[in-house]
Image (cartoon, grey):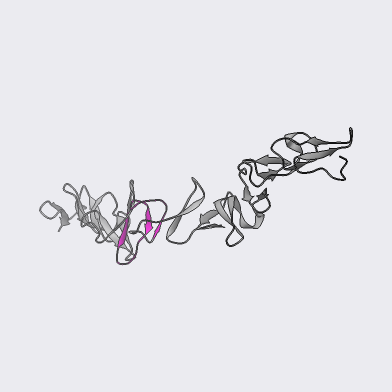
Amino acid sequence: SCVTSCPNYYYANTTIWLCSQCDSSCLTCNGGYAENCTSCSPTATLRYLLLKMCWSVCPGGYYSNDTACACQICPVNLNCGNCTYQNSSQTVLCTSCAYGYFLQGSACQPSCNSNQFAYLGNNSCVTCDTSCLTCIGPGSTSCSSCTSPLLLISNLTGGYCISTCPTVGFYISGSINCVACDLTCLNCSDAGASSCTACYNGSYLNSGYCRLVCPPAKYPNTALSICST
Protein backbone atom coordinates (compact mmCIF):
# COMPACT_ATOMS: atom_id res chain seq x y z
CA SER A 1 0.00 0.00 0.00
CA CYS A 2 1.03 3.60 -0.43
CA VAL A 3 1.45 5.66 2.80
CA THR A 4 2.20 9.30 3.52
CA SER A 5 4.72 8.40 6.27
CA CYS A 6 6.62 5.25 7.15
CA PRO A 7 5.95 3.40 10.44
CA ASN A 8 8.42 2.77 13.24
CA TYR A 9 11.52 0.76 12.27
CA TYR A 10 11.30 2.10 8.70
CA TYR A 11 12.34 5.29 6.95
CA ALA A 12 11.19 7.02 3.78
CA ASN A 13 13.67 6.04 1.08
CA THR A 14 13.06 8.73 -1.53
CA THR A 15 15.51 7.15 -3.94
CA ILE A 16 13.31 4.12 -4.57
CA TRP A 17 10.11 5.47 -2.95
CA LEU A 18 9.84 2.65 -0.47
CA CYS A 19 9.72 2.39 3.30
CA SER A 20 13.14 0.85 3.92
CA GLN A 21 14.10 -0.85 7.14
CA CYS A 22 16.09 1.01 9.78
CA ASP A 23 19.04 -0.56 11.54
CA SER A 24 17.75 -2.94 14.20
CA SER A 25 18.95 -0.59 16.97
CA CYS A 26 16.63 2.28 15.89
CA LEU A 27 12.96 2.92 16.60
CA THR A 28 12.85 5.64 13.93
CA CYS A 29 15.59 6.72 11.55
CA ASN A 30 16.43 8.66 8.42
CA GLY A 31 18.70 6.02 6.90
CA GLY A 32 19.55 2.36 7.07
CA TYR A 33 22.67 2.54 9.26
CA ALA A 34 23.13 2.53 13.04
CA GLU A 35 24.31 6.16 12.77
CA ASN A 36 20.94 7.22 11.28
CA CYS A 37 18.70 6.74 14.34
CA THR A 38 16.34 9.57 15.27
CA SER A 39 14.82 7.76 18.26
CA CYS A 40 15.30 4.52 20.19
CA SER A 41 12.86 1.96 21.50
CA PRO A 42 12.20 2.36 25.26
CA THR A 43 12.00 -1.42 25.64
CA ALA A 44 15.19 -2.27 23.71
CA THR A 45 18.62 -2.91 25.17
CA LEU A 46 19.99 -0.02 23.09
CA ARG A 47 17.45 2.57 24.16
CA TYR A 48 19.34 5.85 24.71
CA LEU A 49 19.86 8.16 21.73
CA LEU A 50 23.17 10.00 21.44
CA LEU A 51 24.89 11.31 18.30
CA LYS A 52 22.24 9.60 16.13
CA MET A 53 23.02 6.19 17.63
CA CYS A 54 21.28 4.08 20.27
CA TRP A 55 23.30 3.10 23.34
CA SER A 56 22.71 0.66 26.19
CA VAL A 57 24.65 2.83 28.65
CA CYS A 58 25.39 6.53 28.34
CA PRO A 59 29.10 7.50 28.28
CA GLY A 60 30.84 9.65 30.88
CA GLY A 61 29.54 13.18 31.14
CA TYR A 62 25.99 12.15 30.14
CA TYR A 63 23.01 10.79 32.06
CA SER A 64 20.28 8.36 30.96
CA ASN A 65 16.91 10.07 30.52
CA ASP A 66 14.38 7.23 30.46
CA THR A 67 11.52 9.58 29.61
CA ALA A 68 13.22 10.96 26.51
CA CYS A 69 15.06 7.68 25.78
CA ALA A 70 18.19 9.73 25.26
CA CYS A 71 21.63 10.43 26.70
CA GLN A 72 21.70 14.03 27.87
CA ILE A 73 24.80 15.96 28.86
CA CYS A 74 25.41 16.73 32.54
CA PRO A 75 24.53 20.41 33.17
CA VAL A 76 27.69 22.51 33.01
CA ASN A 77 26.70 24.60 36.04
CA LEU A 78 26.73 21.50 38.28
CA ASN A 79 30.44 20.84 37.60
CA CYS A 80 29.85 17.09 37.38
CA GLY A 81 32.30 14.62 35.90
CA ASN A 82 29.50 12.06 35.70
CA CYS A 83 25.87 12.37 36.72
CA THR A 84 22.58 10.54 37.00
CA TYR A 85 18.92 11.51 36.69
CA GLN A 86 16.57 11.05 39.62
CA ASN A 87 13.10 10.44 38.24
CA SER A 88 11.28 10.98 41.54
CA SER A 89 12.55 14.55 41.95
CA GLN A 90 13.28 15.16 38.24
CA THR A 91 16.74 16.45 39.12
CA VAL A 92 20.25 15.71 37.91
CA LEU A 93 22.67 14.51 40.61
CA CYS A 94 26.46 14.35 40.32
CA THR A 95 28.14 10.98 40.87
CA SER A 96 31.66 12.37 40.28
CA CYS A 97 33.11 15.83 39.77
CA ALA A 98 35.08 17.77 37.20
CA TYR A 99 38.71 18.57 37.98
CA GLY A 100 38.99 21.14 40.77
CA TYR A 101 35.63 20.21 42.35
CA PHE A 102 34.85 17.68 45.05
CA LEU A 103 31.78 15.53 45.60
CA GLN A 104 29.78 16.23 48.76
CA GLY A 105 26.70 14.04 48.75
CA SER A 106 25.48 14.54 45.19
CA ALA A 107 26.82 18.07 44.64
CA CYS A 108 30.23 19.23 43.41
CA GLN A 109 31.85 22.00 45.47
CA PRO A 110 35.16 23.87 45.03
CA SER A 111 36.26 22.86 48.55
CA CYS A 112 35.41 20.38 51.29
CA ASN A 113 33.97 21.00 54.75
CA SER A 114 36.41 21.74 57.56
CA ASN A 115 36.09 18.20 58.98
CA GLN A 116 36.81 16.61 55.59
CA PHE A 117 39.78 16.25 53.27
CA ALA A 118 39.83 16.41 49.49
CA TYR A 119 40.59 12.97 48.08
CA LEU A 120 42.09 13.52 44.63
CA GLY A 121 41.76 9.85 43.68
CA ASN A 122 38.11 10.40 42.78
CA ASN A 123 37.61 14.12 43.55
CA SER A 124 35.48 13.45 46.61
CA CYS A 125 35.26 14.83 50.15
CA VAL A 126 36.05 12.23 52.80
CA THR A 127 35.31 12.77 56.50
CA CYS A 128 38.34 12.98 58.79
CA ASP A 129 39.00 10.44 61.51
CA THR A 130 36.98 11.15 64.66
CA SER A 131 40.17 12.03 66.55
CA CYS A 132 40.88 14.98 64.21
CA LEU A 133 39.29 18.42 64.00
CA THR A 134 40.81 18.93 60.54
CA CYS A 135 42.97 16.57 58.49
CA ILE A 136 44.92 16.09 55.28
CA GLY A 137 44.10 12.41 54.74
CA PRO A 138 42.40 9.32 56.15
CA GLY A 139 42.93 7.74 59.56
CA SER A 140 44.20 8.99 62.89
CA THR A 141 47.70 9.66 61.47
CA SER A 142 46.63 12.54 59.19
CA CYS A 143 45.31 15.15 61.65
CA SER A 144 46.21 18.79 61.05
CA SER A 145 44.36 20.13 64.13
CA CYS A 146 42.54 18.64 67.11
CA THR A 147 39.42 19.18 69.15
CA SER A 148 40.06 20.72 72.58
CA PRO A 149 41.62 19.61 74.89
CA LEU A 150 43.61 17.28 72.62
CA LEU A 151 47.03 18.37 71.37
CA LEU A 152 48.46 17.93 67.88
CA ILE A 153 51.80 16.17 67.60
CA SER A 154 53.48 15.76 64.23
CA ASN A 155 56.40 13.58 63.20
CA LEU A 156 57.67 11.71 60.16
CA THR A 157 54.76 9.25 60.33
CA GLY A 158 51.97 11.84 60.41
CA GLY A 159 49.88 14.05 62.68
CA TYR A 160 48.21 12.71 65.81
CA CYS A 161 45.80 14.06 68.42
CA ILE A 162 46.93 13.12 71.93
CA SER A 163 45.65 13.91 75.41
CA THR A 164 49.01 14.83 76.97
CA CYS A 165 52.33 15.97 75.56
CA PRO A 166 55.33 13.61 76.07
CA THR A 167 57.36 14.54 79.12
CA VAL A 168 60.66 14.38 77.23
CA GLY A 169 61.65 16.23 74.07
CA PHE A 170 58.50 18.30 73.49
CA TYR A 171 56.80 21.52 74.60
CA ILE A 172 53.23 22.82 74.27
CA SER A 173 52.95 25.64 71.74
CA GLY A 174 49.94 27.93 71.87
CA SER A 175 48.04 25.37 74.01
CA ILE A 176 47.05 23.39 70.88
CA ASN A 177 50.28 21.87 69.54
CA CYS A 178 52.85 19.52 70.99
CA VAL A 179 56.10 20.51 69.27
CA ALA A 180 59.49 18.80 69.34
CA CYS A 181 62.30 20.59 71.14
CA ASP A 182 65.55 21.45 69.41
CA LEU A 183 67.66 18.31 69.01
CA THR A 184 70.18 19.61 71.58
CA CYS A 185 67.52 19.81 74.33
CA LEU A 186 66.17 17.04 76.53
CA ASN A 187 63.27 19.34 77.47
CA CYS A 188 62.48 22.89 76.48
CA SER A 189 60.05 25.78 76.89
CA ASP A 190 59.97 26.97 73.27
CA ALA A 191 61.50 26.42 69.84
CA GLY A 192 65.18 26.84 69.13
CA ALA A 193 68.42 25.86 70.82
CA SER A 194 68.19 28.76 73.33
CA SER A 195 65.04 27.43 75.05
CA CYS A 196 66.36 24.25 76.66
CA THR A 197 65.25 23.50 80.22
CA ALA A 198 67.11 20.19 80.57
CA CYS A 199 69.95 18.48 78.72
CA TYR A 200 70.98 14.97 77.75
CA ASN A 201 73.80 13.26 79.63
CA GLY A 202 77.09 14.59 78.38
CA SER A 203 75.88 18.16 77.83
CA TYR A 204 75.22 20.92 80.35
CA LEU A 205 72.52 23.58 80.61
CA ASN A 206 73.72 27.17 80.60
CA SER A 207 71.51 30.20 79.90
CA GLY A 208 68.99 28.10 77.96
CA TYR A 209 71.60 26.26 75.86
CA CYS A 210 72.87 22.72 76.22
CA ARG A 211 76.66 22.93 75.92
CA LEU A 212 79.31 20.26 75.65
CA VAL A 213 81.76 22.62 77.41
CA CYS A 214 80.82 25.09 80.11
CA PRO A 215 81.92 28.75 79.79
CA PRO A 216 84.72 30.25 81.92
CA ALA A 217 84.05 30.51 85.67
CA LYS A 218 81.61 27.57 85.52
CA TYR A 219 82.09 23.85 85.83
CA PRO A 220 80.09 20.90 84.41
CA ASN A 221 77.77 19.57 87.11
CA THR A 222 77.36 15.98 85.90
CA ALA A 223 74.76 15.15 88.56
CA LEU A 224 72.35 17.85 87.32
CA SER A 225 73.64 18.23 83.73
CA ILE A 226 74.07 21.96 84.23
CA CYS A 227 76.91 24.42 84.29
CA SER A 228 77.37 25.45 87.91
CA THR A 229 79.39 28.31 89.39
Q: Nearer the viewer, residue 67 or 225?
A: 67
Left or right: residue 3 compared with residue 58: right
Q: Position of residue 56 (x, y in %)?
A: 62, 41
**Residue at 61% over, 60% down:** 90
Quadrant in which residue 36 is drawn: top right
Residue 147 colored magenta?
yes
Nearest the eye: 13 or 161: 13
Residue 57 sits in quarter: top right
Q: Position of residue 99 (x, y in %)?
A: 58, 49
Q: Quadrant of the C terminus?
A: bottom left
Residue farthest along the left direction in this orientation: 223
Rendering coords of residue 172 (x, y %): 29, 62
Residue 158 at x, y = what percent? 35, 49
Magenta-colored span: 134-153
Q: Is residue 17 above or below residue 118?
A: above
Answer with left or right where residue 225 lies relative to residue 180.
left
Instruction: Provide the major secondary structure of the magenta segment.
Output: loop
- Quadrant occupied by the N terminus: top right
Extreme residue in the front direction? 1
Q: Tell me if residue 175 comes above or below residue 167 in the rendering.
A: below
Q: Residue at position x 63%, y 45% from top?
A: 43
